[in-house]
Amino acid sequence: MTHPGFEAQLDAYLDGELATIDARQLEAHLAQCPECARFRQERLELRAAIKARVPAFQASDALRERVQTALRGASRVRATRRFGAPVVWRSLALAASLAVVALGSWRLALQRAAGETLADAVLTSHIRSLMPGHLTDVPSSDQHTVKPWFNGKLDFSPPVFDFAGRGYPLIGGRLDYVGGRSVAALVYGRRQHLINVLLWPTGRGPTFAPATETRQGYHLLHWTTPDYTYWVVSDLGLVELQDFAQLLRQADSAASGPAAARGLR
């Protein structure tokens, strides 16, 4: 033979295993090459002799079933290898998503618990202030007396306003301890009702809590400004207490705006 690889290619052709385009090229070559055509004829004669003289054994049904079972098992293994990795990654991605949700829920639960604890402390401060001798450390209706009193007693200077002209006179102020830190407590009056305003700098301690809630017959209002965290608590009617809170918000906003613009706060 003068054509390397022709023998293997011819065997594949005779077994029907050669690609169509390769088979056509081989047939065109055989039509033009007498030597390769003669070799093909010899190969065909050899195949015929083997088929005529070598006995053939028919596989039993049991063997055929075992072979088919083995082939089906191999197919399943290949399918598992092909699709197993994506399934595993999808499972890992789902597990990671669930972990993120669980972590977020856990953090939210901690924030809620901290807010509940803080609200309890605020309410306790208000109830304690109603006991004789605990309402104020500096009894005064003059905001210019109350505000300077806090100097040196706190690491911040709380804003103090008087709303006597709107029916909410300033009664005084005191130091208190809420949420693990010293805070300012301002006391206001409304007829026979007392209003406690507790405040401290924003970002110091938990702030997550409902804006409005009622406990043991007392209303608690909560909000945060860029400078301070405010809690207002009283047994005053909710509508009037919200009116007072609005006055406090407006006064704080008016006082902080110009000061912030001048860089004094």
Image (cartoon, helix red, strand yellow):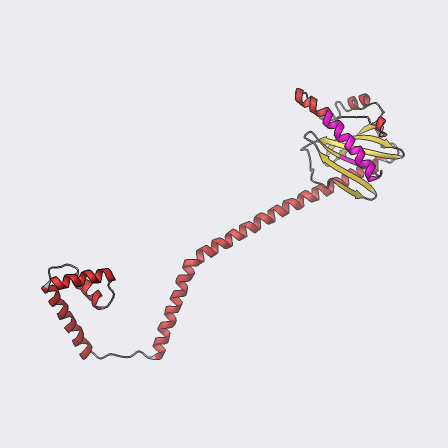
Side (left or right) of 17 relative to 225? left
- Quarter of the figure with residue 217: top right
> Residue 132: where, in percent of width, then height?
88, 34
> Residue 173: where, in percent of width, then height?
81, 28
Q: Is residue 179 above or below residue 9?
A: above
> Residue 84: where, in percent of width, then height?
44, 58
Front-lying residue, 232 or 15:
15
- 63 magenta-colored: no
- 234 magenta-colored: yes
Quarter of the image that includes the C terminus? top right
Going 80% across and 44% down the picture, which residue do you hit? 215
> Among all residues in the image, which is located at the extreme left?
34
Going 90% across and 34% down the picture, which residue do you hit? 192
- Quarter of the figure with residue 214: top right
Q: Is residue 112 visible?
A: yes
Extent of the magenta region: 231-254
